[in-house]
Amino acid sequence: MLKVLLASRNAGKLREFSDLLPSFPLVPWPADAPELPETGAFFQDNALQKAEGARAWWHLHGTEPVDGVLADDSGLCVDALWGGPGVLSARFAQDLPSYPERNRRLLAMLSEGADRAARFVCVLAFAPMPGRGHGGPFTVSGAVEGTLAFEHRGENGFGYDPIFIPEGFDQTFGELPSGTKHSLSHRARACAALRARLAANPQ
Ligand code: ITT
């Protein structure tokens, strides 16, 4: 069983990883640990940057042994916004204090009759601790296609969930039960790829 440091400050992600990776004991990123830089242009760059930055910090300051570090870079990509906010999803509309307000601003950026196609994308980077096997750092990814709702609907999940309707459903991730999100989400698909990759290369 792998013990994994989750290099994330996002409480919504931590909740989801606990459900999606029940066989991996997760060590949360400590509150007093540094902010991890994410300066890349692509999800993959940022996921690797966070995983490698956290691994280097934990190597010096970690309080318990872990087998590897997991980082997630993810976001909502809207076709009518040229793929935005995409890699900038966490930084979109930060002048507004809450997600309901940020979601309303995002929806207001689409003109009437605009293409509402969107997808959630998740790239996971796994960096084994030195001497723990599994080769070098690697990434896996997952995505879920859908459309943008016309208004913020539901309180489940986090972030942009209340404005995203996954393909094949009428309700947003904010309205659907978490079990439905976990059966098809970008993060669930990336976690499935992670489990497969680790199972294929156990040492
Ligand atoms: P860490 O870097 O500490 O993990 P973060 O929130 O800064 O946390 P990202 O840079 O990956 O993480 O930004 C991803 C943003 O995309 C996140 O803040 C949410 O707004 C949004 N997002 C990602 N996955 C989502 C999901 O499953 N549901 C809703 N919004 C999501």
Image (cartoon, grey):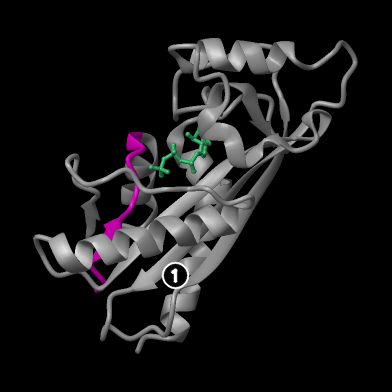
Q: Is residue 29 above or below residue 66?
A: above
At horizontal 53% and vertical 29% (from top left) the residue drawn is: 91
Task: Residue 106: tell me if it is visible.
Answer: yes
Check disc 1: other Cα within 10 Å, few if <14, some if 14-19, many if 20+: some
At horizontal 54% and vertical 45% (from top left) the residue drawn is: 74
Q: Quadrant of the C terminus?
A: bottom left
At horizontal 39% and vertical 42% (from top left) the residue drawn is: 13
Q: Is residue 193 magenta?
A: no
User: Magenta stretch: dominant SS?
Assistant: loop
Q: Nearer the viewer, residue 98 or 14?
A: 98
At horizontal 44% and vertical 74% (from top left) the residue drawn is: 137
Residue 107 falls in image quadrant: top right
Q: Nearer the viewer, residue 119 or 105?
A: 105
Residues shaded magenta: 1-11
Taking the image as shown, residue 51 lies to the left or right of residue 26, namely right
In the rendered image, residue 28, in percent from the top left (x then y), is placed at 23, 49
Q: Nearer the viewer, residue 26 or 5?
A: 5
Q: Is residue 106 above or below residue 123?
A: above
Task: Residue 189: tell me if it is visible.
Answer: no
Look at the numbered disc 1 and give the secondary structure of its residue: helix
Q: Residue furthest right?
A: 113
Residue on which disc 1 sits:
195
Q: Quadrant of the N terminus?
A: bottom left
In the rendered image, residue 191, in percent from the top left (x then y), is placed at 47, 60
In the rendered image, residue 145, in percent from the top left (x then y), is placed at 72, 42
Dot 1 amino acid type: Arg
Q: Is residue 4 magenta?
A: yes
Q: Residue furthest left?
A: 63
Residue 14 falls in image quadrant: top left
